[in-house]
Amino acid sequence: MDNYTFDENGIPTLVDDLTDSCPNTPQNYGDSRQYSQRKASTTTEPDRQIQSFTSREDITDIFDIKGEGFDFKLSYSTQTLTWAPMNPGRSRSRSAKKSFKSLFRSNSSSSIAVNKNSLNFRDILGVKIRRRKRGGQKDGEGFCLGFGILTYEFKTPNVMKDRMIHLEHPSEEVCEKWVTKISEILETFDERPRSVKLFLQPFAGEKDGLSMFRQKILPLFRTADCNVDMTEIQHNEQVKQDLIHINLLDFDCLVCMGGDGTVNKVVNGLLNQSNKDYGIEMKRTVNPVPATIALGIIPTGKTNHIAQSIMGTDEPVTAVLHVLFGNRTKVDVCSIYHEEKFQRWAFNSQYGFAGNVLTFMKRYSALGMKCVEAAFLKALTKSKLRTYECDIEYIPGGETVAPVFCTRCVTYCKVCSAESNNVHNDLVEELDPMAQSGSTSSLIDLGNTSNPWKTLKGDFLNVGLFTISGVCDFAPQGLSKYTHLNDGCMDLAVVKNVDRKDFIRFLRRHGNSKNQFDFPFVETFRVKEVRFRPRFPSSWNYKDHDFNEIDYEMSKVNRNQINNRSKSMQVITDLDSEDRSSVTSMSWGGNGRRAESAMTLQALSIDSDMEESDPHESDGRSNYNMQSQSNLTGPQYRMTFYDKERQKRNKHQRKKDEKRKDREERKMRSVWSVDNEICSDLELDFKVHHGLLIVCGSGLNPSTPAQDVKFGCLPGL
């Protein structure tokens, strides 16, 4: 419970347990407005509207807080709400403090803002009149107790907490006057949303999303006078179907409440619908349009690496406050293509070890939140930890410095600000190979200086593409801690074939302040486009039961026929004239496959003759073809016991070979983990798009302290 006390000057302040236990108290962060509002320093249209209020007279009244009187003043000139105690010199004992009681029944949320005696207009979220109702009374009826002002304060550098200031006054006329004046000021902030479309995934994480929405999220939206149109997600295609029929211009913000999978679905639906409205069909050569409205993320899933990378925390209330305050930041988004066809949008994608972990997470989903640790332990076993042969082509980014030597992306990031201020283009600069981290033995130049593509070939334990840093419980500093949100590039990180012990060292370094890419077996590149192709061995120790030599030769003939039709027709004629008798004799040998191939060869030669003949003679030719096929049919005979046993043995051997083939192929391929969702397509192309999405958040606070890993299984390895 919050403690509301008075200092020596009689000013009410909040005494929180975190003030003594946490060294990074809100007072150490400076003015909270500088963190929450990224555009506060610029003169915007709402600021000019507020300046128009300066001609109005200030209003003052006396309100009670826990039984003590305070002079409150609403100043239009300074754009602040200030207060001072009525009797600043009066001494109070500890017992006297306990005797003061508030008219409000709920005293636990009564507090004051970060500043001790003032509150800026931009730090106010909403204001409501508080009443005491009896049974049967409607909204707007009941005894007036005063009004409440909703504001916030910082609990940690990235976590914000909502605070309610309860001002007691028995006069409803006075309370209505103050509520009206403050509401007029809040309406001038155009960056704050007034109508929100929210998609809720009730089964994400601990499966308590619906109760959390009713108890915590919805009251905040109502206090801030923000209308919420909530839709529960029932199936995977619901978000896509709903966004087709929704007019996005009717809402100020699109909010999703769930895990990374829910965020990915909403992002795909939003960007697809935005491009569809402009008549743009996504292709590799087409530049997409940015999203029409901002996206808010309320994290309630297991990993929440998208929300934590943008806001620095996965606390749902903090995410709601970012949405209500209108904090916006641009984020790069990656488009994924399969066989030159657009597939989806994504932030982070990994192949290899991360894909195996996600596969085992789906298998152990019955364990709840413990499935992540169980999946890691399973993927790290000697039988499951393996390398994968890959061919990776990439276009280097405009920055020649490797990600290992860059700085982290924080609030007011200079790299992102420079990229957003400059005109972004897709021109590719030459990459300096000496600036790459680790060993560059696998870097291959294609030989053509005009070709911007570079190639990586080898066996890799994990391949990662990061558009955002990927902050999560497993990696408090980020899966790629030096990735920027809005620089127009993504980081490519590959882990070469190493011992299991060294790979575990690489995983454990994600949980401390050291750089996880500072290993000789890890290479990092800043890229704009990537082509990924898995590589399989050229020789295969497997008996193909469906292989037929005649069919193989016929397929070669057909391929040659496409390139040179006249030449292929001559080859077919020669085969027909020279091998007709031998093929016919093989058809009587009891081998049905050879007889069928011979019939195919005969029919193909006859069809070639028919193409050169008169079309009016087609009926006679077809009758001749049917007679020829009937002549090539072998005699029917009853199978012996030996033939039946041989057929049974062949069938059993074929099943064993098929199982062996599937088992060996599974060892040579993994799956893609695209924003913690499984993608079975392996041959993928990636292209990053600069500042394509606007997300509610302000980035990581520069004073964010280094945290140890919260993952339970890795420290014991």
Image: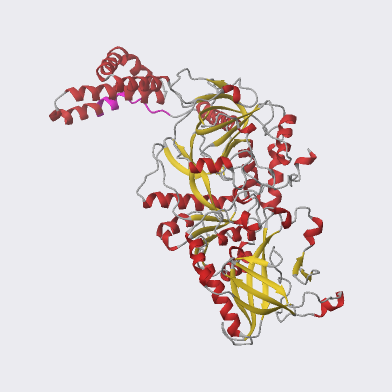
> Which residue is found at the position 51% from the left and 20% from the top?
445
Does residue 486 appear in the picture of this structure? Answer: no
Residue closer to the observer: 299 or 518: 518
Please state the total of marks drawn on the protein image: 0
The magenta stretch spans residue 631: yes
Can you say whether 121 is above or below 511 in the image?
Answer: below
> Which residue is found at the position 62% from the left and 77% from the top?
60
Question: Residue 196 at x, y = what percent?
Answer: 50, 63
Does residue 181 appear in the picture of this structure? Answer: yes
Q: Is residue 708 left or right of residue 523?
A: right
Instruction: Tell me where residue 460 sits by quadrant.
Output: top right
Question: Residue 62 at x, y = what percent?
Answer: 67, 80
Can you say whether 498 is above or below 687 in the image?
Answer: above
Question: Residue 432 at x, y = what percent?
Answer: 55, 23
Residue closer to the observer: 325 or 178: 178
> Which residue is found at the position 56% from the left and 72% from the top?
182
Which range is magenta? 626-637
Report the colour scheme.
secondary structure
Q: Quadrant of the N terminus?
A: bottom right
Instruction: Tell me where residue 111 sits by quadrant.
Output: bottom right
Q: Quadrant of the C terminus?
A: top right
The magenta stretch spans residue 516: no
Residue closer to the observer: 47 or 467: 47
Question: Residue 604 at x, y = what percent?
Answer: 28, 24
